[in-house]
C-alpha cells in the first residue's frame, strides 16, 4: 500500500495513487479521473479499490511498502527492530522485482491439515530425529497458534513452510494429486519404508502404478502445487533473511531448500548450501552446538556423523556438477569434530565393539575420506580452476590410486554392514557408502574423458598415457555402479528421491550404456541397468523427469538381449540376493569377487608387474609405488604425509614416461576378452 507522498508529475500535478490490486502485483497502474476502475482491474475482472494511508516519516514508508507488497494483501504488520535490521537485502529484493516487473505470487492459504500431514511425513524421513531441531517442538508451536503458520516467529514459520514444500513431493493428499477414478484418495503404499524396500524383486516392489494411475502422472499432478509451495518457502526465507541470521531452524531450512533446488543442475548455484554452512559455522563458533557434549558419548558421535553426512551429500553433489565445495576442511572439523581414527583402525575395532558404536566409527571414518577425495578431485582434475591448468598426469594417477583404495575400503565396510542385517538404518548407511563410492568413481571417469576431448593439447605419448588412465577409471566406475546400484535400489523410498544423490543416477547409467571395458559381464550390466531404471522410473512419483535416460537404458537392454542370443525378460536380470558375494575379510583382495574385474587390488600383484617391467628402476622407487596402492594396509591416502610417493611419482614420469604407460597397460588392460577402449 502507498505510505508516502506521491511524487509530482512533470506537469506539476501530483501522481494519482495506484489501486490496491496493481500495487499488490507490482505493476504500473493507470488510475482514471472519473472514478472508473483502472484498465488492468477491468481486464482482470477484479474490484478496483484504492487505499490512501496517512503520511509516515520518510524511510519507514518504503520498508513498509516492501513488506506489504511482499505479503500481497495480508494485514499490515507494525514496524519492528527486526524489520529495520535488514533494509539492504529487502531494498535490493524490492529493487530487483521493480526493475524486472516480476510480480510476487499472492500468499498461500495453507489448510491446517496439510501442515499436520507435512510434519507427520517429515518425521518418517530418515533419520527421524533431526539433530538440528525438534519436530515435536515445532508441532507444539503450531498447536499453540491453532496451526496458523503466519503467527509463528519468523524462523519457525520459514521452517514450517520448507517442511511443507519438501513433504509435498511425496504426499498423496488430494490437495496435491487429486483423487483416483473412484473419487477416493490414493493409498500411501509408496511411502512406508519397509513395505517398499524389503522385497528384492525390482518390478513388483517399485510399482509403476498407484491406485490404478501411473506414478509419472501423479508426479505431473503434484508438480504445480509443489512448485508453488517451494516458491512460497523461498520467498519467506529471503524476506526473513535466514541466510544471514544464524539459528538451528534457519540452518535446517537452508538445507531443505538446497535439497529441493538441486534437482535442476543447469540453474543450481549452491547458494542455499553456502547459507547452510554459514549458519552451521556461526552456531559452532558461538558455542551454540556445545550441547552435543552434554549427551552420552555415543549419542554425540551419532549426531556428528549425521552432520558429517549432510556435508557428504553436499560434497558429492558438488562433485557431480564440478562445483567448488562450499565448506572448508576447517568448517568440517569445527562442526563435525576431528576424525582421528583411520578406516583400518576402525575396522579392527569393529569386531570388539557393539554394532551401533562400530558402525558409527566406521561411517565417520569413511565419510571423512570420501569428502577429502571429492575435494582433491575438484582441486586437481575436475574443478573449474583445475580445468584451466594443464592436465596433471601425476595428480590423475594419485586420484586413481586413491579411489581404488577407497573402493576396497567401501567394499569391506559394505560386507560388515550386510553381516549386521538389513534394517532401515543399516540401509541408509549402505546407501551413503554406495553413493559416495559411485559418485567418486563416475566423476573421475567423467573428468578424464573430458580431458581426452582436449587431446589436441597433448602429445602422442601423453595421449596414450591418458588413454591408459581412462581405462582404469572406467573399470573402477563400472564396478562401483554395478555393486552400488544394489544398495541404492535397496534404499529406494520417496524420501530419498529429491535428496541430492538422486540427480547423479543418469551419469551412473551412462557409464554402463555401451560399456565394452569388460569390467562387468553382460548380465551384471543388465541387472544394474534394470535396478537403475526402476529407481529412475519411481522418481517420477516426486515429479523428477528423466524419461530420456529410461529410454536409453531400454535400448541398451535390447542390445544386451540381442548379443546374448536370448529373449530374456527383465525379471531374469533381477538379483534374488543383492547381498551375495561379499564376505568380511581384512584382505582387500577378498572383497573383489567379480570374475570379470580388470585387475587385482592386491598390491603385491602391482609390485610384481612393476618389478617385471623394470626391476632396476622400480626398485629405486619401490616405496613410492607400494604406497600408491596402500601396500602397508593403512587407510591414508597414497600421497598423505608421504613425500616419498610425491617425489617418486614425479621421478617416474620425468625419467621414463613410456615405462609408465607400459606399467598402466600391464596392470589394467582387460584380460577377459573385453575391448581395450575406455
Image: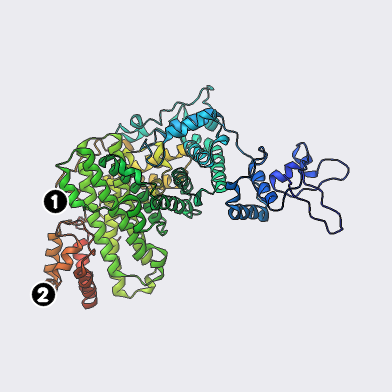
Locate the C terminus by quadrant. Answer: bottom left
Q: Name the N-terminal-most of marks 2 and 1.
A: 1
* Classed neighbour count for the residue bearing mark 2: other residues with Cα under 10 Å, few (<14), some (14–19), many (≥20): few
Q: Alpha-carbon distance for marks 2 and 1?
A: 29 Å
Q: Residue at x 23, y 65 (%)?
A: 639
Q: Dot 1: what SS?
A: loop
The image quarter in which residue 42 lies: top right
Q: Quadrant of the N terminus?
A: top right
In the rendered image, residue 328, in percent from the top left (x then y), is placed at: 37, 58
Can residue 514 be seen by looking at this rendering? no
Is 583 placed left or right of 491 in the picture? left
Foreground tag (2 vs 1): 1
Q: Is residue 458 above or below residue 19?
A: below
Res 523 → quadrant: top left
Name the image colouring: rainbow
Q: Residues within 10 Å of mark 1 (few under 14, many from 20)?
A: some
Query: Relative to residue 358, is residue 387 depicted above or below?
Result: below
Name the spot of residue 48 as percent of width and height, x first: 78, 39
Report the number of numbered marks.
2
- Which residue is disc 2 drawn over? 616
Q: Does residue 139 appear to the left or right of 451 in the view shown?
A: right
Q: Which mark is residue 139?
A: none
Residue 126, given in percent of the width and then of the height, sits at: 36, 37
Label 2: which secondary element: helix
Q: Residue at 27% of width from left, 48% of height from top?
A: 364
Residue at which label 1 appears: 587
Nearest the viewer among 536 and 58 is 58
Q: Does residue 101 show up? A: yes
Amino acid at each position: 500500500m502507498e505510505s508516502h507522498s506521491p511524487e509530482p508529475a512533470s506537469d506539476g500535478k501530483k501522481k494519482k495513487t495506484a489501486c490496491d490490486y496493481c500495487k499488490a502485483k507490482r505493476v504500473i497502474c493507470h488510475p482514471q479521473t472519473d472514478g472508473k476502475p483502472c484498465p488492468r482491474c477491468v481486464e482482470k475482472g477484479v474490484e478496483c479499490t484504492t487505499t490512501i494511508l496517512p503520511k509516515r516519516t520518510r524511510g519507514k514508508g518504503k520498508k513498509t511498502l516492501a513488506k506489504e507488497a511482499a505479503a500481497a494483501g495480508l494485514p499490515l504488520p507494525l514496524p519492528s527492530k527486526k524489520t529495520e535490521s535488514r533494509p539492504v537485502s529487502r531494498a535490493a529484493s524490492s529493487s530487483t522485482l521493480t526493475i524486472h516487473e516480476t510480480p510476487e505470487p499472492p500468499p498461500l492459504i495453507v489448510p491446517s491439515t496439510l501442515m499436520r500431514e507435512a510434519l507427520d511425513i517429515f518425521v518418517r524421513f530418515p533419520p527421524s530425529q533431526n539433530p538440528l531441531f525438534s519436530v515435536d517442538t515445532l508441532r507444539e508451536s503450531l498447536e499453540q497458534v491453532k496451526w496458523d503458520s503466519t503467527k509463528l516467529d519468523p524462523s519457525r514459520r520459514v521452517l514450517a513452510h520448507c517442511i511443507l514444500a519438501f513433504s509435498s513431493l511425496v504426499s498423496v493428499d488430494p490437495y496435491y494429486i487429486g483423487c483416483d477414478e473412484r473419487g477416493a484418495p490414493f493409498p500411501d503404499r509408496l511411502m512406508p519404508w519397509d513395505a517398499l524396500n524389503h522385497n528384492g524383486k525390482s518390478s513388483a516392489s517399485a510399482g509403476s502404478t498407484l491406485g490404478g494411475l501411473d506414478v509419472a502422472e501423479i508426479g505431473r499432478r503434484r508438480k504445480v502445487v509443489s512448485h508453488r509451495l517451494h516458491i512460497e518457502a523461498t520467498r519467506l526465507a529471503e524476506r526473513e533473511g535466514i541466510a544471514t541470521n544464524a539459528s538451528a531452524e534457519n540452518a535446517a531450512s537452508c538445507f531443505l531448500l538446497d535439497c529441493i533446488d538441486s534437482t535442476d543442475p543447469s540453474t543450481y548455484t549452491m547458494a542455499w548450501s553456502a547459507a547452510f554452512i554459514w549458519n552451521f559455522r556461526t552456531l559452532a563458533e558461538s558455542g551454540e552446538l556445545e550441547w552435543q557434549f552434554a549427551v552420552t558419548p555415543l549419542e554425540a558421535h551419532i549426531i556428528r556423523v549425521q552432520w558429517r553426512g549432510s556435508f557428504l551429500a553436499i560434497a558429492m553433489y558438488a562433485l557431480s556438477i564440478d562445483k567448488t565445495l562450499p565448506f572448508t576442511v576447517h568448517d568440517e572439523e569445527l562442526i563435525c569434530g576431528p576424525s582421528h581414527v583411520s578406516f583400518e583402525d576402525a575396522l579392527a575395532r569393529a569386531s570388539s565393539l557393539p554394532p551401533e558404536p562400530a558402525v558409527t566409527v566406521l561411517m565417520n571414518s569413511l565419510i571423512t575420506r570420501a569428502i577429502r577425495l571429492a575435494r582433491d578431485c575438484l582441486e586437481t582434475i575436475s574443478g573449474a580452476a583445475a580445468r584451466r591448468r594443464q592436465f596433471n598426469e601425476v595428480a590423475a594417477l594419485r586420484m586413481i590410486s586413491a579411489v581404488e583404495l577407497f573402493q576396497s575400503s567401501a567394499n569391506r565396510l559394505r560386507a560388515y554392514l550386510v553381516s549386521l542385517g538389513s534394517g532401515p538404518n543399516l540401509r541408509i548407511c549402505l546407501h551413503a557408502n554406495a553413493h559416495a563410492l559411485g559418485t567418486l568413481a563416475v566423476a573421475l571417469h567423467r573428468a578424464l574423458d573430458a580431458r581426452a576431448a582436449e587431446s589436441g593439447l597433448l602429445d602422442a605419448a601423453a595421449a596414450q598415457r591418458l588413454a591408459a588412465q581412462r581405462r582404469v577409471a572406467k573399470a573402477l566406475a563400472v564396478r562401483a555402479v554395478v555393486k552400488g546400484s544394489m544398495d541404492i535400489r535397496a534404499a529406494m523410498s520417496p524420501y530419498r528421491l529429491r535428496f541430492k544423490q538422486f540427480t547423479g543416477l543418469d551419469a551412473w547409467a551412462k557409464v554402463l550404456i555401451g560399456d565394452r571395458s569388460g569390467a562387468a559381464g553382460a548380465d551384471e550390466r543388465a541387472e544394474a541397468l534394470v535396478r537403475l531404471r526402476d529407481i529412475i522410473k519411481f522418481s517420477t512419483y516426486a515429479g523428477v523427469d528423466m524419461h530420456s535416460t529410461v529410454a536409453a537404458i531400454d535400448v541398451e537392454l535390447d542390445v544386451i538381449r540381442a548379443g546374448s542370443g536370448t529373449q530374456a525378460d527383465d525379471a531374469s536380470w533381477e538379483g534374488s540376493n543383492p547381498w551375495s558375494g561379499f564376505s568380511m575379510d581384512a584382505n582387500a583382495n577378498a572383497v573383489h569377487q567379480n570374475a570379470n574385474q580388470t585387475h587385482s587390488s592386491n598390491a603385491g600383484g602391482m609390485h610384481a608387474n612393476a618389478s617385471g617391467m623394470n626391476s632396476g628402476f622400480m626398485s629405486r622407487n619401490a616405496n613410492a609405488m607400494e604406497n600408491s596402492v596402500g601396500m602397508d594396509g593403512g587407510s591414508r591416502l597414497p600421497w598423505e604425509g608421504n613425500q616419498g610417493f610425491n617425489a617418486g611419482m614425479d621421478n617416474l614420469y620425468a625419467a621414463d614416461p613410456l615405462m609408465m604407460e607400459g606399467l598402466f597397460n600391464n596392470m589394467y588392460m582387460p584380460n577377459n576378452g573385453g575391448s581395450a577402449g575406455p
